Structures are given as C-alpha cells and as structure tokens.
Image: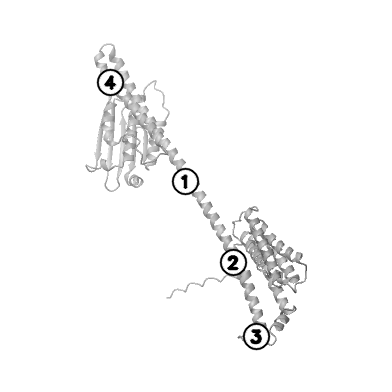
Amino acid sequence: MRDAPDPAPARRSFGEWLTDAFGVDDPWVRPRPTIERRDIVLAGVVAVVGVVSLELARSLGMFEDVVGPVWLQSLAVLSGAALLVGRRRWPLTVGLLAAVHMVVVGVAMPMVMSQFTLQVAYFVAFLSAVAWARDRRAMVAVMGVIVVVMFAWIALQFAVGNSIQEIVDDTAGVGRTGLLGPIPSAVLLTLVINVIYFGSAIAGGQILWRDARQKAQLREQAETISAQAEDLRDQAITEERLRIARELHDVVAHHVSVIGVQAAAAHRVLAHDPAAAAPALGAIESSSREAVSSMRGLLGTLRHIGSRRDEPDGREPEPSIEQLPALAAAHETANRTVAYRLVQSRPDAAARVPAPVGHSIYRTVQEALANVGKHSTATRVSVVVRIEGEDRPYAEVEVVDNGRPRGGSTLGSGLGQLGIRERAASHRGVVDIGPRAGGGYRVRVRYPLDAATEQVA
C-alpha cells in the first residue's frame, strides 16, 4: 500500500504575507529617538542645496512658465527640507506631511516639485516613515494611503489633466522611432519611475527597520548572556566559599578534637609521670601547627578566588585516601583504638579514584572521627574504605564505633554532618548517618565513580 503523499503547504493570503513582510504582529517596538544634530544638519544641507539648485535652474530659464513669485518657490524648497528635522521623531506624521507637500507643490508648481532636492526630501521622508514607525499596523495603513493617492494623482494627470496634451504637443511632427508610440511610452515610463521610487523607499525603510530590530535583539541577548555569566560567577564564588567553610569546619573540628584528647591524656599523667605526658604534648604541638598551616592554606584560597587560575597560590595538595592511615593513627588514644582498612577490587583501584572524591572521603572520615572524640564513649572505631571499579564502580567509606553518647557532652552545631551531606550531594553520593540497632554509631557514604569521573572530566 502506497503512502499518501504529503499535503501541499497551505498558500498564504496576501494579508498574511503583508503582515509578515512588514512585521505587523512583531512585539518589538523601535525606541523613539530625540531630535539630534544629524537631523538638523541633514535638513540644512538639503535646504541649502535646494535653494542653490533652484536659483541655478532659474538662471538657465527653466522656470519661465512657473506661476508664482520667487520667494514662494524658495519657501516650497525650504519647507520640504524642514520636514526632515522630525523624520525619526515623528515618522508617520512627517511622511503624511511630505505627501501633502508633494501634491500641493506638484499642482501649483510642478517644475519646483520635480527638483532633485525636493525629490530626495520626499524619498527620505517616506523611507523614514517605514524605518522608524513604532506602530507597524499604522505604518502599513499610512504608506498604503500615500501610495494609492500618489498613483491616483498620476492617473488623473493623464486622464483629465494636460499631461497627454503636453506629450502630443512635444511630439508633433516627430515620426515614430520606437516600439511604442509617445503616449503609451510616457505613461509606462512614468509608472515605472514611480514604482521604483516608492518601492525603493518602502523596501529600504523595511530593511533598515529589520536591521535595527536584529541589532536590538543581539544587544538584548548579549546583555542576557552577560547577566547569566555574572550570575554563574557569583554562584561559583558562593559555592567556593561554602566549600571553604566546610573545609574550615573540618580542619578546626579535627585538630581541636585531637588537641582536646591529647590534652586530657597529658593532664592525667602530668602530675605523677611528667615524662609520659611528653608524647601527648608533642601531639598537641604538632596538631596545632597543622591547624594553623591548614587555615593559612584556606585563607590563601579565599584570596585566590577571582584571580587568574594559572597563577600559583602556594597551597599544598588537598588530602585524600593516601593520608587516611595517618589520620586514623592520630585519633588513637590509650582508651580507644582506630582500625583502618582499604578494600579494593583491584590493586590500583584507589589510585584511580578522582581527586575530589578522594578528598571528600578524607574529610568524611576526619569529621566522623572528630565527632567520636567529642561526643562518644567508643573504645573501638573501624574505618573501612571500599573501592569497586568493575561493573558499577563506586567508592564507599564507612566509620563505625561501639560507643554511646558521652554523658555531659553538648550537642554540636550539626555543621559537620551537614558538610558530609553536601559533599556527598556534590558527587551524587548516598549518605547513611545514625545510630546502629546493635549499638554504636555509623557514618557511611557511597560515591558513584562513573558520575564523579564525568564531573571531573
């Protein structure tokens, strides 16, 4: 069975074509300009050239048959040029006045109306009416009336005026030299000239209007892109500041926790065994130095926001999975053991974990161990990192303890766990934080490595 042929596209009516060609339903409205120096200069140049041309033509005897004083002829030229001052401010009004001026001067002083400068003034007025009209529907109506009136006037000149008689008088006694006779040739030539004259003014004005609309749209798009770029920049700065806030919280919480634990240990043995307090005091000194160094690095990051990315900032690499054994050992005390274990699906799986995910895993463990030291009675803590790099690759970190909330300890601000959740969300991770049914507390976060890899790329 043959497929039915595609239906032919519907033909547009003349009204639809006209509406689309002149942008009648276009929502863009061209701004109304003020009268500028260029408008006055244009009118002045046309006026001066018009008066000079008029005087030169009179000197050649071209206006011997013109009825009317010289000052009236000059006034006709000057008034036509003066219309150009408001051609952009009031385009349709100037277009109508130019048409009236053309008819009145053409009836009273045809030779003056046919002068080059007045024809230029009328052409510019009609072109500006199309190019600068804010109401496109009114523009179509006004220009339609002008064109109809002008061609009706030309037809009347040939039908009931003396144009035919003038052609007959001028060609009396002259034999036929072309394909057509003098009368049909004159009619057709007049028709062609006026079609080109008014058609060029309307088409040129429409081209200028569309060009202005396109430039306005491009400016609007550029402004939108610039605003969006500024919003994205502000969003990036905000996200960077949030990241630094999380880093600052994690660093301070970790080192303060270590300092507190070691200080308590030193306090217990300082009185009866000062030598035993030395390692704890050394750990306090080391942790405080690391805290200061880390905070300086974060302050350097703050100063680095908005600077060139290719400029070195002097910061050390961010910690990752490789530093987890040292982190676990730093949180061991005489009453608490911290066991760390790395489970990999293949020997190089941990090395293939993207740096942002590895850093988030480190900070998660750091925050979880800091909370154990501050709020738990746990004696055993297990830190397990699992890396699966086969079918559905993921990286998972789990921190489990056997303690219960310490009596007399105050609840934290919750920013630590919020930071863990935010880090996980940035990598599409899944978070499981809370007490276990058999006792103790669990912090577990799983990061899908495929999504993380795509983000890093």
Q: How is the image coloured?
A: one colour
In what element is the residue under mark 2? Answer: helix
> Residue 405's x, y, as percent?
37, 25
In what element is the residue under mark 3? Answer: loop
**Label 1, residues with CA under 10 Å away: few <14, some 14-19, many ≥20:** few
Answer with the quarter of the image where residue 281 lies.
Answer: top left
Q: Are marks 1 and 4 in contact (CB under 8 Å)?
A: no
* Tag shown at residue 183: none
Q: Residue at x 62, y 55 (%)?
A: 38
Q: Alpha-carbon distance for marks 4 and 3?
A: 119 Å
Q: Is residue 362 left or right of residue 96?
A: left
Residue underneath mark 4: 282
Q: Alpha-carbon distance for marks 3 and 2?
A: 32 Å
Please state which amino acid type lies under the numbered disc 1. Ala
Q: Is residue 62 left or right of residue 346?
A: right
Q: Are marks 4 and 3 in contact (CB under 8 Å)?
A: no
Residue underneath mark 2: 203
Q: Are marks 2 and 1 in contact (CB under 8 Å)?
A: no
Mark in front: 4 vs 3: 3
Q: Earlier in the sequence, mark 2 or mark 1?
A: 2
Residue underneath mark 1: 229
**Label 3, residues with CA under 10 Å away: few <14, some 14-19, many ≥20:** few
- In this view, 111 is above or below 290: below
Please state which amino acid type lies under the numbered disc 3. Gly
Please state which amino acid type lies under the numbered disc 4. Gly
In what element is the residue under mark 1? Answer: helix
> Residue 249's x, y, as percent?
39, 30
**Label 4, residues with CA under 10 Å away: few <14, some 14-19, many ≥20:** few
Q: Residue at x 34, y 30 (%)?
A: 294
Mark in front: 1 vs 3: 3
- In this view, 423 is above or below 180: above
